[in-house]
Image (spheres, helix red, strand yellow):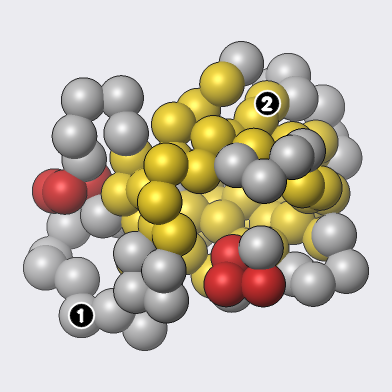
């Protein structure tokens, strides 16, 4: 899970069915009208990045924890959305593929 600890942005051009693809925020993305994403910190802190009303990014704070070797549980502090899990389909230093589980 150590490789997970960074900021990831959605590379929607690479999605495959229900598998979402994320790349590090330092990746040279093609132009897009905005990219959602998230940041996993080593201490269990989590930030979900949503598109803000002004087209920028809005960070929503929360927590994450490993739930086995292939799942991560997410809880957002503002409780606007229900808790959810991400199933890690694959993870390396340059790409994260996940499937969202409600």
Find residue 28 and name its label.
1
Report whether 31 appears left or right of 10.
left
Helix, strand or loop for disc 2: strand
Give the residue number, with chain letter if any, for mark 2: 84
- The span from disc 1 to disc 2 (Cα, nearest Å) is 29 Å
Sequence-wise first label, 1 or 2: 1
Q: Quadrant of the C terminus?
A: top right
User: Percent from the top left, x then y, of residue 13?
Assistant: 13, 48
Q: Is residue 84 above or below residue 48?
A: above
Residue beneath the point at 56% across and 56% down: 38
**In percent of the image, x 33 and y 40: which residue is there?**
20
Tell me the residue at 75%/25% (across/down): 83
User: Picture coordinates of residue 34 (x, y %)?
Assistant: 30, 54
Quadrant of the rendered image containing residue 78: top right
The x, y position of residue 35, in whole percent, is: 34, 54
Between 91 and 56, the residue placed more toward the observer is 91
The residue carrying pointer 1 sits among few (fewer than 14), some (14 to 19) or many (20 or more) residues within 10 Å by Cα, namely few
């Amino acid at each position: 899970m150590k490789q997970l600890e960074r900021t990831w942005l959605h590379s929607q051009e690479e999605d495959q069915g229900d598998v979402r693809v994320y790349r590090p925020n330092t990746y040279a993305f093609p132009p897009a009208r905005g990219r959602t994403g998230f940041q996993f910190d080593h201490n269990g802190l989590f930030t979900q990045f949503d598109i803000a009303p002004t087209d920028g990014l809005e960070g929503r704070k929360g927590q994450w924890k490993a739930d086995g070797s292939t799942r991560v549980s997410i809880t957002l502090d503002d409780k606007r959305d229900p808790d959810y899990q991400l199933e890690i389909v694959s993870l390396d230093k340059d790409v994260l593929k996940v499937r969202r589980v409600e």
